[in-house]
Amino acid sequence: MNFKNPLFFIIAFTLLISACGPHYIVKDYKEIKDGQWYYKDSLVYEFTISDTNKVYNLYLDVTHSDTFNFQNVYVKLHTLFPQTQKLDQQLSLELASKAGVWNGECSGKTCTALIALQQGTFFNQLGKYKLTIEQFMRTDPVRGINKIGFLIEKTEVNKSSYLKLKKKKTQ
């Protein structure tokens, strides 16, 4: 093998970068028809957790137009756990800074913001979960939201190690 060949270094570098990226066990995107999100159009994401010993990071990946009229979008999240426990919460998804600069990346007339829902979390129950997202703005429809992805990143950190470290930091 010729290690002086530039193609070898390009391939090795590409493999190195791709191996270091996040490991998403869920990556589910829902399109919003014509960029008009109505109250009645809830987004439903179903996923299965098969490892309760790992720590996870949960994200929403919001794609919107660069002419979106608001700094944020209010949503209601409804999480249904495997043993039918339900958790409801309201959340503001910050799409722009207070100065009006879009968070995330913009290309052409489209912007994408990766928003952390929870970082360093874990699941206590094995099985199937369901997350439902409703728009909760004062206007119906909300115009300019094109797509929302739900992503779960599985980290290499074990729950017990994470809890020990967290306990140590609070002492």
Image (cartoon, rainbow, N blue to C red):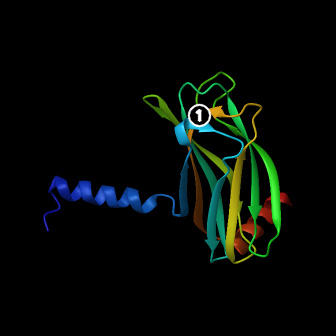
- Along the horizontal axis of the image, is 12 left or right of 24? left
Judge from the rendering whether residue 42 lies leftward or rightward of residue 66; answer left or right: right
Q: Tell me which residue sits at (31%, 56%) in the image.
A: 13
Provide the residue designation for mark 1: 103
Closer-to-camera residue (55/134): 134
Please give the name of the residue rendered at 74% of the width and 65% of the height, measured from the top-left corner.
Answer: 165
Whether 22 is drawn above or below 91: the answer is below
Q: Residue furthest top?
A: 99
Q: Is residue 66 left or right of 142 when viewed as pictured?
A: left
Point out residue 93 in the picture as x, y percentages from the top left corner: 69, 40
User: How many numbered dots are placed on residues in this image?
Assistant: 1
The quarter of the rendered structure image containing the N terminus is: bottom left
Q: Quadrant of the C terminus?
A: bottom right
In this picture, is 70 found above or below 104?
A: above
Residue 86 x, y percent position in the rendering: 82, 64
In the depicted structure, whether residue 96 falls above or below residue 114: above
The percent coordinates of residue 111 (x first, y second) are 51, 34
Q: What residue is at 79 percent from the left and 76 percent from the top?
A: 83
Q: Residue at x 60, y 61 (%)?
A: 152
Q: Element at badge 1?
A: loop
Q: Position of residue 127 (x, y in %)?
A: 68, 77
Q: In terms of image quadrants, where is residue 130?
A: bottom right
